[in-house]
Amino acid sequence: MKQIVKNAYWPQIVGAVAWLATAGLTYFIPNADDFPRTTTFAVVCLGIAILSAISLPLNKVRYYGAWILALALFIGIWEVVQAKLLLLPRPFFGAPQELLDVFITDWAKLLNSLAHSMMLLVGGYLLGCIIGFVIGVGMGWSKLFGYWAHPVLRFLGPLPPVAFLPLLFAVIPSSFVAGELLMAFAASFPVAVLTWSGIAGVNPSYYDVAKTMGAKPLFLIRHVAIPAALPFVFVGMFMALGSCFYMLVVAEMLGVKAGLGFYMQWAQGWAAYPNMYAALLIMAVMCTSFMTLLFKVRNRLLRWQKESIKW
Amino acid sequence: MVDSLVKQQKIEITNVSHSYSLDDHDLPVLEEIDLTIEPNEFVVILGPSGCGKSTLLRMVAGLERPEQGSIKANGEEIIAADPSRIVVFQDPTLFPWLTVRQNVELGFKIQKKKDDKAISDMLEMIGLAGFDNAYPSQLSGGMAQRVALARALVNDPSVLILDEPLGKLDSLTRITMQKELVNLWRNKQFTGLMVTHDIEEALLLATRIIVMRQRPAHIIGEFKLDMDYPRHRDSEELLKIRREIFGLLGHKSDW
Protein backbone atom coordinates (compact mmCIF):
# COMPACT_ATOMS: atom_id res chain seq x y z
CA MET A 1 0.00 0.00 0.00
CA LYS A 2 1.31 3.40 -0.91
CA GLN A 3 1.38 5.93 1.85
CA ILE A 4 -0.51 8.97 0.62
CA VAL A 5 -0.82 10.82 3.92
CA LYS A 6 2.43 12.47 4.89
CA ASN A 7 3.96 10.55 7.76
CA ALA A 8 3.75 12.53 10.95
CA TYR A 9 7.01 13.63 12.57
CA TRP A 10 6.07 13.31 16.22
CA PRO A 11 6.28 9.52 16.72
CA GLN A 12 9.88 9.46 15.56
CA ILE A 13 10.80 12.57 17.57
CA VAL A 14 9.29 11.07 20.68
CA GLY A 15 10.96 7.78 19.76
CA ALA A 16 14.39 9.43 19.60
CA VAL A 17 13.76 11.04 22.98
CA ALA A 18 12.65 7.70 24.40
CA TRP A 19 15.85 6.03 23.20
CA LEU A 20 17.81 8.85 24.79
CA ALA A 21 15.89 8.29 28.03
CA THR A 22 16.62 4.56 27.87
CA ALA A 23 20.31 5.33 27.40
CA GLY A 24 20.20 7.68 30.38
CA LEU A 25 18.44 5.35 32.78
CA THR A 26 20.70 2.48 31.73
CA TYR A 27 23.79 4.52 32.48
CA PHE A 28 22.74 6.48 35.57
CA ILE A 29 20.52 4.13 37.57
CA PRO A 30 22.64 1.50 39.33
CA ASN A 31 22.10 -2.16 38.41
CA ALA A 32 20.38 -4.43 40.95
CA ASP A 33 22.85 -7.21 40.24
CA ASP A 34 26.09 -7.74 38.39
CA PHE A 35 25.33 -7.20 34.69
CA PRO A 36 27.98 -6.95 31.96
CA ARG A 37 28.27 -4.28 29.27
CA THR A 38 25.92 -1.80 30.88
CA THR A 39 27.87 1.19 29.60
CA THR A 40 28.16 -0.31 26.11
CA PHE A 41 24.44 -0.87 26.05
CA ALA A 42 23.79 2.73 27.07
CA VAL A 43 26.04 3.84 24.21
CA VAL A 44 24.11 1.63 21.76
CA CYS A 45 20.83 3.22 22.91
CA LEU A 46 22.35 6.65 22.54
CA GLY A 47 23.48 5.70 19.02
CA ILE A 48 19.95 4.61 18.11
CA ALA A 49 18.59 7.89 19.50
CA ILE A 50 21.01 9.87 17.34
CA LEU A 51 20.25 7.77 14.25
CA SER A 52 16.52 8.27 14.76
CA ALA A 53 17.03 12.00 15.07
CA ILE A 54 19.15 12.43 11.96
CA SER A 55 16.98 10.13 9.82
CA LEU A 56 13.95 12.27 10.57
CA PRO A 57 13.84 13.82 7.08
CA LEU A 58 13.64 10.37 5.44
CA ASN A 59 10.05 9.55 4.57
CA LYS A 60 10.65 5.80 4.53
CA VAL A 61 12.15 5.77 8.04
CA ARG A 62 9.48 8.10 9.37
CA TYR A 63 6.84 5.58 8.31
CA TYR A 64 8.26 3.36 11.05
CA GLY A 65 8.43 6.19 13.59
CA ALA A 66 5.83 4.60 15.83
CA TRP A 67 7.82 1.37 15.81
CA ILE A 68 10.97 3.23 16.85
CA LEU A 69 9.03 4.64 19.77
CA ALA A 70 7.44 1.31 20.70
CA LEU A 71 10.77 -0.51 20.66
CA ALA A 72 12.36 2.20 22.83
CA LEU A 73 9.57 1.77 25.39
CA PHE A 74 9.86 -2.01 25.28
CA ILE A 75 13.64 -2.00 25.76
CA GLY A 76 13.43 0.72 28.39
CA ILE A 77 10.84 -1.13 30.46
CA TRP A 78 12.76 -4.39 30.07
CA GLU A 79 15.93 -2.66 31.26
CA VAL A 80 14.20 -1.25 34.33
CA VAL A 81 12.34 -4.45 35.18
CA GLN A 82 15.32 -6.74 34.85
CA ALA A 83 18.60 -4.85 35.23
CA LYS A 84 17.50 -2.20 37.69
CA LEU A 85 14.81 -3.90 39.79
CA LEU A 86 15.54 -7.60 39.09
CA LEU A 87 11.87 -8.54 39.21
CA LEU A 88 12.34 -11.75 37.20
CA PRO A 89 14.55 -14.65 38.30
CA ARG A 90 18.00 -15.03 36.81
CA PRO A 91 19.32 -16.82 34.77
CA PHE A 92 16.11 -17.69 32.90
CA PHE A 93 15.44 -14.06 32.09
CA GLY A 94 18.25 -11.90 30.81
CA ALA A 95 18.69 -8.17 30.73
CA PRO A 96 19.18 -6.34 27.40
CA GLN A 97 22.89 -5.82 28.12
CA GLU A 98 23.36 -9.55 28.64
CA LEU A 99 22.02 -10.21 25.18
CA LEU A 100 24.38 -7.56 23.85
CA ASP A 101 27.21 -9.25 25.71
CA VAL A 102 26.45 -12.55 23.97
CA PHE A 103 26.63 -10.94 20.56
CA ILE A 104 29.93 -9.25 21.41
CA THR A 105 31.68 -12.22 23.01
CA ASP A 106 30.20 -15.13 21.10
CA TRP A 107 29.57 -13.71 17.63
CA ALA A 108 31.97 -16.11 15.91
CA LYS A 109 30.22 -19.18 17.27
CA LEU A 110 26.79 -17.74 16.49
CA LEU A 111 27.83 -16.90 12.95
CA ASN A 112 29.25 -20.38 12.51
CA SER A 113 26.01 -21.90 13.80
CA LEU A 114 24.01 -19.72 11.45
CA ALA A 115 26.14 -20.83 8.51
CA HIS A 116 25.65 -24.49 9.42
CA SER A 117 21.91 -24.09 9.80
CA MET A 118 21.65 -22.30 6.49
CA MET A 119 23.67 -24.97 4.71
CA LEU A 120 21.48 -27.70 6.10
CA LEU A 121 18.30 -25.79 5.36
CA VAL A 122 19.11 -24.61 1.84
CA GLY A 123 20.48 -27.95 0.70
CA GLY A 124 17.61 -30.01 2.09
CA TYR A 125 14.92 -27.57 1.04
CA LEU A 126 16.11 -27.20 -2.53
CA LEU A 127 16.65 -30.93 -2.92
CA GLY A 128 13.16 -31.57 -1.55
CA CYS A 129 11.58 -28.94 -3.82
CA ILE A 130 13.23 -30.43 -6.90
CA ILE A 131 12.20 -33.98 -5.97
CA GLY A 132 8.67 -32.88 -5.11
CA PHE A 133 8.36 -30.88 -8.32
CA VAL A 134 9.50 -33.78 -10.49
CA ILE A 135 7.13 -36.19 -8.72
CA GLY A 136 4.26 -33.69 -9.02
CA VAL A 137 4.84 -33.08 -12.73
CA GLY A 138 5.16 -36.80 -13.34
CA MET A 139 1.94 -37.56 -11.50
CA GLY A 140 0.06 -34.77 -13.21
CA TRP A 141 1.28 -35.77 -16.63
CA SER A 142 1.72 -39.51 -16.87
CA LYS A 143 -0.87 -42.10 -15.92
CA LEU A 144 1.80 -44.80 -15.54
CA PHE A 145 3.93 -42.62 -13.27
CA GLY A 146 0.84 -41.77 -11.24
CA TYR A 147 -0.07 -45.44 -10.92
CA TRP A 148 3.17 -46.11 -9.05
CA ALA A 149 3.77 -42.79 -7.35
CA HIS A 150 0.30 -42.07 -6.03
CA PRO A 151 0.05 -44.94 -3.49
CA VAL A 152 3.60 -44.28 -2.28
CA LEU A 153 2.83 -40.61 -1.83
CA ARG A 154 -0.39 -41.39 -0.02
CA PHE A 155 1.31 -43.88 2.24
CA LEU A 156 4.48 -42.00 3.16
CA GLY A 157 3.57 -38.37 2.59
CA PRO A 158 1.36 -37.75 5.65
CA LEU A 159 3.95 -39.33 7.94
CA PRO A 160 5.65 -36.62 10.02
CA PRO A 161 9.27 -36.50 8.83
CA VAL A 162 10.40 -36.46 12.47
CA ALA A 163 9.33 -40.09 12.68
CA PHE A 164 12.27 -41.01 10.44
CA LEU A 165 14.72 -39.19 12.66
CA PRO A 166 15.86 -42.05 14.92
CA LEU A 167 16.14 -44.41 11.96
CA LEU A 168 18.08 -42.03 9.74
CA PHE A 169 20.50 -40.98 12.45
CA ALA A 170 21.18 -44.64 13.15
CA VAL A 171 21.55 -45.76 9.54
CA ILE A 172 23.40 -42.82 8.02
CA PRO A 173 26.78 -42.15 9.61
CA SER A 174 26.85 -38.47 8.72
CA SER A 175 24.28 -36.61 10.78
CA PHE A 176 24.51 -33.74 8.33
CA VAL A 177 23.46 -35.97 5.42
CA ALA A 178 20.72 -37.50 7.55
CA GLY A 179 19.43 -34.03 8.43
CA GLU A 180 19.58 -33.02 4.81
CA LEU A 181 17.50 -36.04 3.81
CA LEU A 182 14.93 -35.36 6.51
CA MET A 183 14.58 -31.81 5.32
CA ALA A 184 14.26 -32.96 1.71
CA PHE A 185 11.57 -35.40 2.75
CA ALA A 186 9.72 -32.69 4.65
CA ALA A 187 9.84 -30.35 1.67
CA SER A 188 9.04 -32.81 -1.09
CA PHE A 189 5.60 -33.87 0.11
CA PRO A 190 3.79 -30.51 -0.03
CA VAL A 191 5.58 -29.52 -3.23
CA ALA A 192 4.66 -32.82 -4.90
CA VAL A 193 0.99 -32.65 -3.92
CA LEU A 194 0.55 -29.02 -4.89
CA THR A 195 2.46 -29.37 -8.18
CA TRP A 196 0.40 -32.41 -9.02
CA SER A 197 -2.88 -30.66 -8.33
CA GLY A 198 -1.68 -27.61 -10.24
CA ILE A 199 -0.85 -29.66 -13.32
CA ALA A 200 -4.05 -31.68 -13.06
CA GLY A 201 -6.07 -28.47 -12.89
CA VAL A 202 -4.67 -26.84 -16.02
CA ASN A 203 -7.45 -25.68 -18.33
CA PRO A 204 -7.47 -28.33 -21.11
CA SER A 205 -8.18 -25.63 -23.68
CA TYR A 206 -4.65 -24.34 -23.13
CA TYR A 207 -3.36 -27.62 -24.49
CA ASP A 208 -5.78 -27.47 -27.42
CA VAL A 209 -4.62 -23.98 -28.31
CA ALA A 210 -0.99 -25.04 -28.33
CA LYS A 211 -1.71 -28.32 -30.11
CA THR A 212 -3.57 -26.66 -32.95
CA MET A 213 -0.43 -24.60 -33.51
CA GLY A 214 1.66 -27.76 -33.75
CA ALA A 215 2.94 -28.17 -30.19
CA LYS A 216 4.51 -31.51 -29.20
CA PRO A 217 4.19 -33.03 -25.69
CA LEU A 218 7.51 -31.61 -24.50
CA PHE A 219 6.38 -28.10 -25.38
CA LEU A 220 3.04 -28.72 -23.66
CA ILE A 221 4.79 -29.72 -20.42
CA ARG A 222 7.43 -27.01 -20.43
CA HIS A 223 5.48 -24.07 -21.76
CA VAL A 224 1.87 -24.82 -20.87
CA ALA A 225 1.51 -27.21 -17.94
CA ILE A 226 4.36 -25.95 -15.77
CA PRO A 227 3.75 -22.21 -16.09
CA ALA A 228 0.03 -22.76 -15.56
CA ALA A 229 0.72 -24.81 -12.43
CA LEU A 230 3.34 -22.45 -11.03
CA PRO A 231 1.02 -20.59 -8.61
CA PHE A 232 0.28 -23.93 -6.95
CA VAL A 233 3.93 -24.91 -6.93
CA PHE A 234 4.69 -21.79 -4.92
CA VAL A 235 1.99 -22.57 -2.39
CA GLY A 236 3.66 -25.94 -1.99
CA MET A 237 7.09 -24.36 -1.64
CA PHE A 238 5.73 -21.99 0.98
CA MET A 239 4.37 -24.86 3.03
CA ALA A 240 7.57 -26.81 2.46
CA LEU A 241 9.70 -23.98 3.79
CA GLY A 242 7.64 -23.90 6.96
CA SER A 243 8.08 -27.60 7.62
CA CYS A 244 11.80 -27.31 6.80
CA PHE A 245 12.26 -24.67 9.52
CA TYR A 246 10.58 -27.05 11.89
CA MET A 247 12.67 -30.01 10.80
CA LEU A 248 15.84 -27.95 10.98
CA VAL A 249 15.42 -27.16 14.65
CA VAL A 250 14.40 -30.69 15.53
CA ALA A 251 17.29 -32.23 13.61
CA GLU A 252 19.82 -29.87 15.16
CA MET A 253 18.51 -30.40 18.65
CA LEU A 254 18.43 -34.16 18.38
CA GLY A 255 21.33 -35.22 16.22
CA VAL A 256 23.22 -32.75 14.11
CA LYS A 257 26.14 -31.40 16.12
CA ALA A 258 26.13 -27.90 14.69
CA GLY A 259 23.78 -25.07 13.84
CA LEU A 260 21.52 -22.74 15.77
CA GLY A 261 19.36 -25.54 17.19
CA PHE A 262 22.43 -27.26 18.52
CA TYR A 263 23.71 -23.96 19.92
CA MET A 264 20.44 -23.46 21.77
CA GLN A 265 20.57 -26.96 23.16
CA TRP A 266 24.12 -26.34 24.30
CA ALA A 267 23.19 -22.98 25.83
CA GLN A 268 20.44 -24.61 27.80
CA GLY A 269 22.86 -27.23 29.08
CA TRP A 270 25.07 -24.48 30.49
CA ALA A 271 22.09 -22.47 31.71
CA ALA A 272 23.33 -19.71 29.43
CA TYR A 273 19.89 -18.37 28.71
CA PRO A 274 20.96 -15.05 27.17
CA ASN A 275 22.83 -17.13 24.57
CA MET A 276 19.63 -18.93 23.81
CA TYR A 277 17.78 -15.66 23.34
CA ALA A 278 20.48 -14.52 20.97
CA ALA A 279 20.21 -17.72 18.94
CA LEU A 280 16.42 -17.40 18.87
CA LEU A 281 16.71 -13.87 17.59
CA ILE A 282 19.10 -14.92 14.83
CA MET A 283 16.90 -17.84 13.92
CA ALA A 284 13.87 -15.58 13.58
CA VAL A 285 15.82 -13.24 11.31
CA MET A 286 17.01 -16.20 9.23
CA CYS A 287 13.53 -17.67 8.83
CA THR A 288 11.88 -14.43 7.89
CA SER A 289 14.69 -13.69 5.43
CA PHE A 290 14.18 -17.00 3.64
CA MET A 291 10.44 -16.41 3.56
CA THR A 292 10.98 -12.94 2.12
CA LEU A 293 13.32 -14.33 -0.50
CA LEU A 294 10.78 -16.97 -1.50
CA PHE A 295 8.05 -14.35 -1.86
CA LYS A 296 10.38 -12.14 -3.88
CA VAL A 297 11.05 -14.96 -6.33
CA ARG A 298 7.36 -15.79 -6.44
CA ASN A 299 6.27 -12.22 -7.10
CA ARG A 300 8.83 -11.97 -9.86
CA LEU A 301 7.76 -15.19 -11.59
CA LEU A 302 4.05 -14.66 -11.05
CA ARG A 303 3.95 -10.96 -11.82
CA TRP A 304 1.20 -11.71 -14.33
CA GLN A 305 -1.18 -12.53 -11.49
CA LYS A 306 -3.47 -9.67 -10.68
CA GLU A 307 -3.85 -10.49 -7.04
CA SER A 308 -0.82 -11.29 -4.96
CA ILE A 309 -0.19 -10.67 -1.30
CA LYS A 310 2.76 -8.73 -0.01
CA TRP A 311 4.91 -10.61 2.48
CA MET B 1 0.62 -17.05 -56.69
CA VAL B 2 1.76 -20.61 -56.17
CA ASP B 3 2.05 -19.91 -52.49
CA SER B 4 -1.60 -19.19 -51.94
CA LEU B 5 -2.53 -22.17 -54.10
CA VAL B 6 -0.55 -24.49 -51.84
CA LYS B 7 -2.16 -22.81 -48.90
CA GLN B 8 -5.69 -23.61 -50.03
CA GLN B 9 -7.43 -26.46 -48.31
CA LYS B 10 -10.56 -28.20 -49.37
CA ILE B 11 -12.22 -29.86 -46.39
CA GLU B 12 -14.39 -32.91 -47.03
CA ILE B 13 -16.49 -34.29 -44.24
CA THR B 14 -18.02 -37.59 -45.27
CA ASN B 15 -20.63 -39.55 -43.34
CA VAL B 16 -19.32 -38.55 -39.91
CA SER B 17 -21.07 -39.91 -36.82
CA HIS B 18 -19.85 -39.67 -33.27
CA SER B 19 -21.05 -40.32 -29.74
CA TYR B 20 -19.82 -39.77 -26.22
CA SER B 21 -20.06 -42.42 -23.57
CA LEU B 22 -21.96 -41.11 -20.60
CA ASP B 23 -22.06 -43.32 -17.50
CA ASP B 24 -23.55 -46.50 -18.92
CA HIS B 25 -25.00 -45.40 -22.22
CA ASP B 26 -23.76 -43.78 -25.40
CA LEU B 27 -24.89 -40.28 -26.21
CA PRO B 28 -24.87 -39.71 -29.97
CA VAL B 29 -23.75 -36.16 -30.80
CA LEU B 30 -23.21 -36.25 -34.56
CA GLU B 31 -25.15 -38.23 -37.11
CA GLU B 32 -24.16 -38.77 -40.71
CA ILE B 33 -22.70 -35.38 -41.42
CA ASP B 34 -21.73 -34.71 -45.03
CA LEU B 35 -20.19 -31.36 -45.81
CA THR B 36 -17.63 -30.07 -48.26
CA ILE B 37 -15.95 -26.73 -47.72
CA GLU B 38 -14.26 -25.10 -50.67
CA PRO B 39 -11.22 -22.86 -50.23
CA ASN B 40 -12.01 -19.25 -49.29
CA GLU B 41 -15.57 -19.95 -48.32
CA PHE B 42 -16.90 -18.64 -45.04
CA VAL B 43 -19.14 -21.43 -43.81
CA VAL B 44 -21.21 -20.84 -40.70
CA ILE B 45 -22.79 -23.76 -38.91
CA LEU B 46 -25.92 -22.69 -37.10
CA GLY B 47 -27.76 -24.67 -34.50
CA PRO B 48 -28.94 -24.77 -30.91
CA SER B 49 -26.36 -24.78 -28.14
CA GLY B 50 -24.85 -28.12 -27.22
CA CYS B 51 -25.82 -29.90 -30.40
CA GLY B 52 -22.39 -31.24 -31.20
CA LYS B 53 -21.23 -28.46 -33.49
CA SER B 54 -18.11 -27.85 -31.42
CA THR B 55 -17.23 -31.55 -31.63
CA LEU B 56 -17.33 -31.33 -35.39
CA LEU B 57 -15.00 -28.34 -35.32
CA ARG B 58 -12.56 -30.13 -33.03
CA MET B 59 -12.48 -32.96 -35.53
CA VAL B 60 -11.75 -30.66 -38.45
CA ALA B 61 -8.97 -29.15 -36.35
CA GLY B 62 -7.57 -32.61 -35.73
CA LEU B 63 -8.02 -32.44 -31.95
CA GLU B 64 -10.42 -35.40 -32.00
CA ARG B 65 -11.13 -38.29 -34.35
CA PRO B 66 -14.64 -39.26 -35.46
CA GLU B 67 -15.91 -42.72 -34.57
CA GLN B 68 -17.28 -43.13 -38.05
CA GLY B 69 -16.74 -41.50 -41.40
CA SER B 70 -13.83 -39.45 -42.60
CA ILE B 71 -12.64 -35.86 -42.60
CA LYS B 72 -10.12 -34.98 -45.28
CA ALA B 73 -8.11 -31.93 -46.14
CA ASN B 74 -7.14 -31.86 -49.81
CA GLY B 75 -7.91 -35.55 -50.03
CA GLU B 76 -5.78 -36.52 -47.03
CA GLU B 77 -7.33 -37.81 -43.83
CA ILE B 78 -6.96 -35.38 -40.92
CA ILE B 79 -5.29 -37.38 -38.17
CA ALA B 80 -3.65 -34.69 -36.06
CA ALA B 81 -3.73 -31.00 -35.34
CA ASP B 82 -1.81 -28.86 -37.77
CA PRO B 83 -0.93 -25.17 -37.74
CA SER B 84 -2.61 -24.78 -41.14
CA ARG B 85 -5.94 -25.21 -39.34
CA ILE B 86 -6.18 -23.07 -36.26
CA VAL B 87 -9.03 -22.84 -33.78
CA VAL B 88 -10.32 -19.78 -31.99
CA PHE B 89 -12.43 -20.81 -29.01
CA GLN B 90 -15.37 -19.18 -27.31
CA ASP B 91 -13.09 -18.17 -24.43
CA PRO B 92 -9.99 -16.30 -25.51
CA THR B 93 -7.87 -18.93 -23.66
CA LEU B 94 -4.90 -16.60 -23.69
CA PHE B 95 -2.05 -17.83 -21.55
CA PRO B 96 -2.27 -15.55 -18.50
CA TRP B 97 1.46 -15.83 -17.78
CA LEU B 98 2.42 -14.41 -21.19
CA THR B 99 2.12 -10.82 -22.35
CA VAL B 100 -0.11 -9.93 -25.29
CA ARG B 101 2.88 -9.99 -27.60
CA GLN B 102 4.15 -13.32 -26.29
CA ASN B 103 0.67 -14.79 -26.67
CA VAL B 104 0.49 -13.74 -30.31
CA GLU B 105 3.99 -15.13 -30.77
CA LEU B 106 2.97 -18.57 -29.44
CA GLY B 107 2.67 -20.26 -32.83
CA PHE B 108 6.07 -18.94 -33.91
CA LYS B 109 7.62 -20.15 -30.69
CA ILE B 110 6.19 -23.62 -31.23
CA GLN B 111 7.38 -23.68 -34.84
CA LYS B 112 10.71 -22.09 -33.83
CA LYS B 113 10.23 -19.12 -36.13
CA LYS B 114 11.19 -15.53 -35.44
CA ASP B 115 9.39 -12.68 -37.13
CA ASP B 116 8.99 -9.61 -34.97
CA LYS B 117 7.59 -7.57 -37.80
CA ALA B 118 4.77 -10.03 -38.50
CA ILE B 119 3.78 -9.85 -34.83
CA SER B 120 3.85 -6.06 -34.78
CA ASP B 121 1.86 -5.85 -38.01
CA MET B 122 -0.70 -8.29 -36.67
CA LEU B 123 -1.10 -6.34 -33.43
CA GLU B 124 -1.50 -3.17 -35.48
CA MET B 125 -4.08 -4.77 -37.74
CA ILE B 126 -6.15 -5.99 -34.82
CA GLY B 127 -5.98 -2.59 -33.13
CA LEU B 128 -3.80 -3.59 -30.23
CA ALA B 129 -0.55 -1.81 -31.03
CA GLY B 130 0.85 -0.45 -27.78
CA PHE B 131 -0.59 -3.29 -25.72
CA ASP B 132 2.44 -5.53 -26.36
CA ASN B 133 3.45 -5.83 -22.74
CA ALA B 134 0.00 -5.96 -21.14
CA TYR B 135 -1.02 -9.19 -19.45
CA PRO B 136 -4.34 -10.85 -20.36
CA SER B 137 -5.76 -10.06 -16.92
CA GLN B 138 -5.55 -6.38 -17.85
CA LEU B 139 -7.64 -6.74 -21.02
CA SER B 140 -11.38 -6.43 -21.58
CA GLY B 141 -13.29 -9.36 -23.06
CA GLY B 142 -13.31 -7.85 -26.54
CA MET B 143 -9.63 -7.04 -26.46
CA ALA B 144 -8.77 -10.51 -25.22
CA GLN B 145 -10.74 -12.11 -28.03
CA ARG B 146 -8.96 -9.84 -30.51
CA VAL B 147 -5.64 -11.08 -29.19
CA ALA B 148 -6.88 -14.65 -29.59
CA LEU B 149 -7.76 -13.88 -33.22
CA ALA B 150 -4.36 -12.30 -33.77
CA ARG B 151 -2.66 -15.30 -32.18
CA ALA B 152 -4.43 -17.54 -34.70
CA LEU B 153 -4.11 -15.37 -37.79
CA VAL B 154 -0.42 -14.56 -37.41
CA ASN B 155 0.24 -18.18 -38.38
CA ASP B 156 -1.43 -17.52 -41.70
CA PRO B 157 -3.73 -20.54 -41.43
CA SER B 158 -5.51 -21.77 -44.54
CA VAL B 159 -8.54 -22.70 -42.44
CA LEU B 160 -9.62 -20.61 -39.48
CA ILE B 161 -11.96 -22.55 -37.22
CA LEU B 162 -14.12 -20.34 -35.04
CA ASP B 163 -16.07 -21.92 -32.19
CA GLU B 164 -18.59 -19.26 -31.18
CA PRO B 165 -15.76 -16.76 -30.91
CA LEU B 166 -18.03 -13.82 -30.15
CA GLY B 167 -20.43 -15.73 -27.95
CA LYS B 168 -19.40 -14.12 -24.69
CA LEU B 169 -19.00 -10.52 -25.82
CA ASP B 170 -21.47 -7.73 -25.16
CA SER B 171 -23.70 -6.92 -28.12
CA LEU B 172 -21.94 -3.70 -29.16
CA THR B 173 -18.45 -5.22 -29.07
CA ARG B 174 -19.91 -8.11 -30.95
CA ILE B 175 -21.14 -5.96 -33.81
CA THR B 176 -17.70 -4.33 -34.12
CA MET B 177 -15.96 -7.68 -34.04
CA GLN B 178 -18.28 -9.12 -36.71
CA LYS B 179 -17.24 -6.33 -39.04
CA GLU B 180 -13.60 -6.91 -38.19
CA LEU B 181 -13.91 -10.62 -38.84
CA VAL B 182 -15.30 -10.00 -42.30
CA ASN B 183 -12.47 -7.58 -43.06
CA LEU B 184 -9.84 -9.99 -41.80
CA TRP B 185 -11.31 -12.81 -43.82
CA ARG B 186 -11.27 -10.69 -46.97
CA ASN B 187 -7.73 -9.45 -46.38
CA LYS B 188 -6.05 -12.66 -45.27
CA GLN B 189 -7.74 -15.04 -47.69
CA PHE B 190 -8.38 -17.93 -45.35
CA THR B 191 -11.26 -20.38 -45.35
CA GLY B 192 -13.63 -19.65 -42.48
CA LEU B 193 -15.50 -22.35 -40.62
CA MET B 194 -17.53 -20.95 -37.79
CA VAL B 195 -20.09 -22.23 -35.35
CA THR B 196 -22.68 -19.95 -33.79
CA HIS B 197 -26.19 -19.98 -32.43
CA ASP B 198 -26.77 -16.38 -33.42
CA ILE B 199 -28.74 -16.27 -36.68
CA GLU B 200 -27.95 -12.62 -37.33
CA GLU B 201 -24.23 -13.25 -36.99
CA ALA B 202 -24.48 -16.09 -39.48
CA LEU B 203 -26.38 -13.90 -41.93
CA LEU B 204 -23.85 -11.09 -41.71
CA LEU B 205 -20.74 -13.21 -42.10
CA ALA B 206 -21.39 -16.37 -44.07
CA THR B 207 -21.06 -17.22 -47.71
CA ARG B 208 -22.92 -20.38 -46.79
CA ILE B 209 -25.04 -21.24 -43.75
CA ILE B 210 -25.46 -24.83 -42.61
CA VAL B 211 -28.38 -25.38 -40.24
CA MET B 212 -28.18 -28.25 -37.77
CA ARG B 213 -30.83 -29.74 -35.61
CA GLN B 214 -30.55 -30.69 -31.92
CA ARG B 215 -28.62 -33.75 -30.69
CA PRO B 216 -27.60 -35.82 -32.47
CA ALA B 217 -26.56 -33.03 -34.79
CA HIS B 218 -27.61 -33.52 -38.36
CA ILE B 219 -27.71 -31.09 -41.29
CA ILE B 220 -31.26 -30.01 -41.99
CA GLY B 221 -30.73 -27.03 -44.25
CA GLU B 222 -28.22 -25.12 -46.31
CA PHE B 223 -28.29 -21.55 -47.61
CA LYS B 224 -25.92 -19.89 -50.06
CA LEU B 225 -25.45 -16.17 -49.53
CA ASP B 226 -23.81 -14.24 -52.33
CA MET B 227 -24.55 -10.70 -51.17
CA ASP B 228 -21.71 -8.22 -50.91
CA TYR B 229 -20.17 -7.07 -47.64
CA PRO B 230 -20.78 -5.12 -45.51
CA ARG B 231 -24.30 -6.45 -45.26
CA HIS B 232 -27.21 -4.73 -43.60
CA ARG B 233 -29.09 -6.70 -41.08
CA ASP B 234 -32.47 -5.43 -42.28
CA SER B 235 -32.00 -6.10 -46.00
CA GLU B 236 -34.93 -7.86 -47.61
CA GLU B 237 -32.91 -10.89 -48.77
CA LEU B 238 -31.40 -11.52 -45.35
CA LEU B 239 -34.77 -11.24 -43.65
CA LYS B 240 -36.18 -13.81 -46.03
CA ILE B 241 -33.43 -16.31 -45.26
CA ARG B 242 -33.76 -15.53 -41.57
CA ARG B 243 -37.44 -16.39 -41.66
CA GLU B 244 -36.71 -19.70 -43.35
CA ILE B 245 -34.04 -20.58 -40.81
CA PHE B 246 -36.36 -19.82 -37.91
CA GLY B 247 -38.88 -22.10 -39.56
CA LEU B 248 -36.32 -24.88 -39.90
CA LEU B 249 -35.38 -24.59 -36.25
CA GLY B 250 -39.01 -24.87 -35.23
CA HIS B 251 -39.75 -21.27 -34.39
CA LYS B 252 -41.90 -20.42 -37.39
CA SER B 253 -44.26 -18.19 -35.48
CA ASP B 254 -41.71 -16.61 -33.14
CA TRP B 255 -39.49 -14.54 -35.40
Image: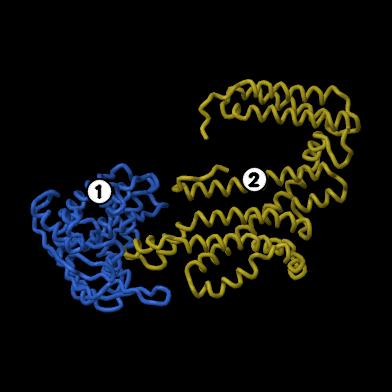
The answer to which quarter of the image holds residue A93 is top right
* Image: B137 above or below A184: above
The answer to which quarter of the image holds residue A210 is bottom left
Q: Secondary structure at mark 2?
A: helix
Give coordinates of residue A230: x percent, y percent. Answer: 49, 56
- Determine whether label 1 and label 2 are within 8 Å by CB: no
Q: Which chain is blue?
A: B
Judge the density around disc 2: few (<14), some (14-19), many (≥20) Cα neighbours within 10 Å: few
- Amino acid of disc 1: Arg
- Residue plotted at (42% across, 60% down): A203
Q: Residue furthest bottom?
A: B68
Residue B220 left/right relative to A245:
left
Give coordinates of residue A285: x percent, y percent. Answer: 68, 43
**Image disc number at residue A78:** none
Residue A284 left/right relative to A292:
right
Residue annotated with mark 1: B174
Residue annotated with mark 2: A288
Residue B41 in view: no
Judge the density around disc 1: few (<14), some (14-19), many (≥20) Cα neighbours within 10 Å: some
- Residue plotted at (23% across, 56% down): B198
Distance from disc 1 to disc 2, alpha carbons, whole Å, reads 51 Å
Give coordinates of residue A36: x percent, y percent. Answer: 86, 34
Closer to the camera in the image, B205 or A172 = B205
Q: Which chain is yellow?
A: A
Give coordinates of residue A91: x percent, y percent. Answer: 88, 41
The answer to which quarter of the image holds residue A162 is bottom right
- Amino acid of disc 2: Thr
Q: Please state the chain letter of the residue tagged with numbered disc 1 in the rendered image.
A: B
Closer to the camera in the image, A264 or B192 = B192
Image quadrant occupied by the C terminus of chain B: bottom left
